[in-house]
Image (cartoon, helix red, strand yellow):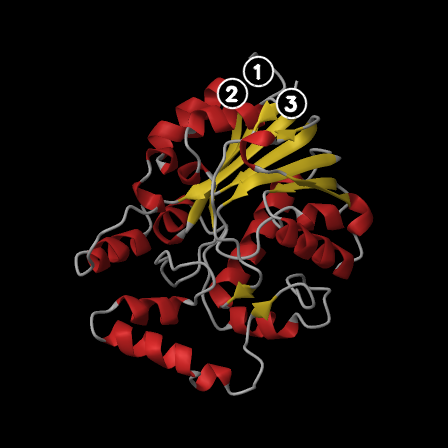
Amino acid sequence: MADRIPEVTLKLARVDVGLGTAYERVAIYRLFERWAENRQIQTALEGPIDGMAGIPGLHLLGLARRGTHVTVALPDTAGLDIVRSIYRLHGVEDRLTTIEVVGNESTLPGNYDLVLSYNALPLVGNWRSYLESLAKHASRFLLVSVTNPYSYGVGIRKLQRLLESPREPELFDHDSVRPSVLGPFLNRLGRIVEHGHLDSPWWPDLFVPTGQTLAGATLARLPIVGKWASARGRSGGPQHNGAPQPYLYGRDRFPLFGDNPDHQELAAALKRHPVFDGKGALLGHLFGHHHAYLVQTDDAVY
């Protein structure tokens, strides 16, 4: 029997903006492909809630390029159209199924070798029930990625909030992101076989709003300066002078893989910036913007 999807309202991005989002994509694809290697993932599902600051529904594109048939579930018609366009751009639309979910009236059908939840847990009403519902569709693996609450960027963001009013709760405040809480719960749904940090560049994660760059959002949050930056953005500052904005990717241009013709821009940028993915647990703990678990669900009993 299919399970009902919790109703949630999200601001969904239509484009990826900035080097930070681009690198997050690269880190996602590298880690997920490494974990899937030799595990024969033939079918996979992601969604229906996606906490990515960029375009939702694209985290399994790398697996689709390697032969996995991917199902993407989102509560957004336009978002699914963008997902289909980008899969088409990469020549793998035949490996994609899309499902539009509409609040509490929709259901998720079927079972999949792997089910992915990306940064969604703080955005749903009851994260434990949400994961239990997804796990019932994961015939072999459940992959869960959440914010790393212990990165040095979280410390900086907490200091920033001292200057802000009101001080809104953020992703790193949610109990579901703490390993001491999430890990034991996931072991009830199966057996954790992998745990690692990802998206670990040198720059901090300051939890910028969807569609904004790290620099722009940081300026906007500063007293007095924020009003100037906001007015400058509305009036059309230097970023609106007609020149292509770097690292702006979407349905017509999504060069996140090395074999894409336009990948040189991103590859050249990443050579100039130290990144720490795969460089050890201590560096991942300090620099990682997210951490993720791969849970084997074969023997789980519900």
User: Which amino acid lies under the numbered mark 2 shown in the image of this protein?
Assistant: Leu
Give the quadrant of the N terminus: top right
Q: Earlier in the sequence, mark 3 or mark 2?
A: 3
Camera-side residue of 37 and 153: 153
Q: Quadrant of residue 138?
A: top right
Q: Quadrant of residue 137?
A: top right
User: Which amino acid lies under the numbered mark 3 shown in the image of this protein?
Assistant: Ala
Q: Which residue, as the protein is rendered here, is positioned at the far left?
A: 162
Verify CB contact (< 8 Å) between mark 3 and mark 2. no
Residue hosting label 1:
300
User: Which amino acid lies under the numbered mark 1 shown in the image of this protein?
Assistant: Ala
Instruction: Answer yes or no: is residue 166 visible.
Output: yes
Verify CB contact (< 8 Å) between mark 2 and mark 1. yes
Camera-side residue of 287 and 168: 168
Q: Which residue, as the protein is rendered here, is positioned at the far top?
A: 301
Q: Earlier in the sequence, mark 1 or mark 3?
A: 3
Give SS at disc 3.
Answer: loop
Foreground mark, 1 or 3, reads 3
Is residue 225 depicted above or below 167 in this figure? below
Q: Quadrant of residue 244?
A: bottom right
Q: Is residue 151 left or right of residue 127?
A: left
Residue hosting label 2:
189
Residue hosting label 3:
2
Residue 208 percent location from the top left of the image:
38, 60
Q: Residue at x 47, y 63 (%)?
A: 211
Residue 257 percent location from the top left of the image:
67, 61
